[in-house]
Amino acid sequence: MIRVMLVDDQGIVREGLSSLLNVKPDIEVIGEAENGQVAIEQAIELQPDIILMDMRMPVMDGVAATEAIRQQAPQINILVLTTFDDEDYVSQAMRLGAKGYLLKDTPSDELAEAIRAVHKGYTHLGPGLFEKMIAATPPTRMESPPELEELTPREREVLALIAAGHSNREIAEALFISERTVKNHVNSILKRLNLRDRTQAAILATHLHQR
């Protein structure tokens, strides 16, 4: 069972998310918080597997709460709940350790799949905002590493699909290989290019394509 905590300043949003998630057989909502400060206290007490974290909240926003929780309980994975206007918040939260983001109007099945993916250790990048975050990042900060030439043709294909925002499952379907094989390719790419996660890989690949 994946234990989830909801953080949003709007009670109706928390109620709706809770209703959507509690019908999933492998997901249980174990707590809620209306601001970042309460989120930190609840996270330490309840130790959820995943936190769905809103960004714009009173008392303490989601960025500050993400930083504090990742410092005090790094085993807790955080998924940002966001809108199209929150790309700056999302960028900060991702740099501080959030494992991905979801738009607030994400359908329930996709929401559940994102939670499952992050619980397995993947990073989840929702649609729309990723492109805005890429566009807002100066490409001059990203140099082409010489290790890029060491990637195999298949790894280059996987890297291109990561840059396009595809999940491991989608990459597996596109290349007619297993998800386990995709994961192995992703791990190899990150190791060869000395990158922390697939978000950095996607940003690198996108900037190299723009050069």
Image (cartoon, rainbow, N blue to C red):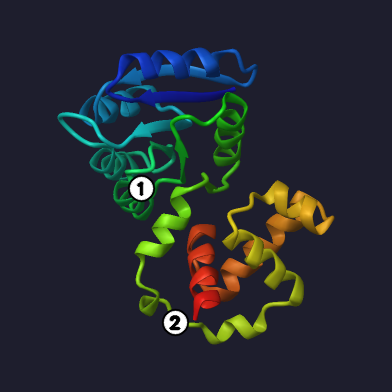
Image x and y of residue 37, in percent: 21, 29
* Horizontal arrangement in the rendering, residue 64 relative to residue 169 (left or right): left
Query: Which residue is disc 2 drawn over?
Result: 143
In front of the other: 210 or 155:
210
Q: Image quarter for residue 81?
A: top left
Query: Residue 54 is drawn in which quadrant?
Result: top left
Q: Residues within 10 Å of mark 1 (few under 14, many from 20)?
A: many
In screen coordinates, is 52 left or right of 202? Answer: left
Identity of the amino acid at label 2? Glu
Vertical relation: 46 (above or below) 114: above
154 shown above or below 127: below
Residue nearest the observer in this picture, 139 or 197: 139
Figure check: 35 above or below 145: above
**Disc assigned to residue 160:** none
Q: Identify the residue at the far right of this view.
A: 176
Q: Residue at x 65, y 61 (%)?
A: 161
Write the residue at 30% across / 19% down. Answer: 10
Which residue is located at x 48 percent, y 65 percent? Answer: 203
| 90 with respect to 165 (left or right) | left
Residue visible at 32% across and 25% down in the picture? 8
Front residue (pair 74, 159): 159
User: Between marks 1 and 2, how big is the CA–CA gap?
Assistant: 23 Å
Instruction: Tell me the quarter of the picture where residue 175 sits.
Output: bottom right
Residue 60: x and y in percent read 18, 34
Quickly name the residue at label 1.
Answer: 90
Dot 2 surroundings within 10 Å: few (below 14), some, or many (20 or more)? few
Residue 17 horizontal/vertical position (percent): 46, 19
How far across and how far down the image is residue 129, in percent?
44, 49
- Marks 1 & 2, CB-CB < 8 Å contact: no
- Label 1 sits on what residue type? Val
Q: Quadrant of the N terminus?
A: top right
Q: Secondary structure at mark 1?
A: helix
